[in-house]
């Protein structure tokens, strides 16, 4: 089955700096790659996703890139703010009718 | 409803007792998922429903765990003879099951086995 590896497990940055979280996946048939943000004690919430027919997607300060050949995708957060502090999970799926397999998460801390 | 609803939000049970956790997905969502999240850990897949059938139940950790879904709506996750290692947040999620696979999570049911 699918295996998703996520790095780093913890990341500390200064406010205003950029943060990058990287994930690799094992199943070349995977074609959907979402990112979830989970604040302490809260549910995971989708922040951005990308499908295999595009290489990059941006939404304000957040961007995701996908390299299908290398089977890795990354989350980029620019101009980080303290409210960006949370655990971020990447995931991969073969699309509708298949489960999402999650990475183990990255604890991002943005220091003011 | 407006979002995925789960109950109870918190449950404390004695070791060896059975528990039932309920999930009410977003109206019209055909796909429903159960995940488990231990404290400070990642999201562990348990089971997936498409309609009332479960094409993937590969994540259920033992035969003490079972789930059902009726009316293509509400799902119940049952844990029999609970053990302390079952303590975790049980997250339900749903998706439209059509275009893509965007899933939306409920707030979770926090289970503590004492």
Image: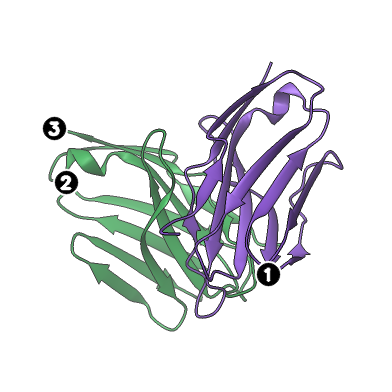
Q: Residues within 10 Å of mark 3 (few under 14, many from 20)?
A: few
Quadrant in the picture for the N terminus of chain A: bottom right
Mark identifier at residue B50: 1
The Cα atoms of the two marked residues, 1 and 3, are separated by 45 Å
Residue topped by disc 2: A17
Q: Are marks 3 and 2 on the same chain?
A: yes
Residue lying at 62% horizontally and 57% vertically, measured from the top left = B33
Q: Chain of mark 2?
A: A
Label 3 vs label 2, nearer the camera? 3
For marks 3 and 2, the one nearer the N-term is: 2
**SS of the residue under disc 3:** loop
Give coordinates of residue B107: x percent, y percent.
47, 43
**SS of the residue under disc 2:** loop
Q: Are marks 1 and 2 on the same chain?
A: no
Give coordinates of residue B50: x percent, y percent.
68, 69
The Cα atoms of the two marked residues, 3 and 2, are separated by 11 Å
Chain A, colour shown:
green
Q: Residues within 10 Å of mark 1 (few under 14, many from 20)?
A: many
Please say if A105 is above or below A71.
Answer: above
Residue lying at 77% horizontally and 57% vertically, measured from the top left = B57
Please say if A60 is above or below A54.
Answer: above
Residue topped by disc 3: A112
Residue lying at 52% horizontally and 41% vertically, measured from the top left = B108
Looking at the image, residue B102 sits to the left or right of residue B34; the answer is: left
Q: Chain of mark 1?
A: B
Label 1 vs label 2, nearer the camera? 1
**SS of the residue under disc 1:** strand
Chain B, colour shown:
purple
């Amino acid at each position: 089955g699918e295996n998703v590896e996520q790095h780093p497990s913890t990341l500390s940055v200064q406010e205003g700096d950029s943060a990058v979280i990287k994930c690799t996946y094992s199943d070349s048939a995977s074609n959907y790659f979402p990112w979830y943000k989970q604040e302490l004690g809260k549910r995971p919430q989708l922040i951005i996703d990308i499908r295999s027919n595009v290489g990059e997607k941006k939404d304000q300060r957040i961007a995701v890139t996908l390299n299908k050949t290398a089977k890795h995708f990354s989350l980029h957060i620019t101009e980080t703010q303290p409210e960006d502090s949370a655990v971020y999970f990447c995931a991969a799926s073969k699309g509708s009718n298949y489960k999402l397999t999650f990475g183990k998460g990255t604890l991002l801390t943005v220091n003011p | 409803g407006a979002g995925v609803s789960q109950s109870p939000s918190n449950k404390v049970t004695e070791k060896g007792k059975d528990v039932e956790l309920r999930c009410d997905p977003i109206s019209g969502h055909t796909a429903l998922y159960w995940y488990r999240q231990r404290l400070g850990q990642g999201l562990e897949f348990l089971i997936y429903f498409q309609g009332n059938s479960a094409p993937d139940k590969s994540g259920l950790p033992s035969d003490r765990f079972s789930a059902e879904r009726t009316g293509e709506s509400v799902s119940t996750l049952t844990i029999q003879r609970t053990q302390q290692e079952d303590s975790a947040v049980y997250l339900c999620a749903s998706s439209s099951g059509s275009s893509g696979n965007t899933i939306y999570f409920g707030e979770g049911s926090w289970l503590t086995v004492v």
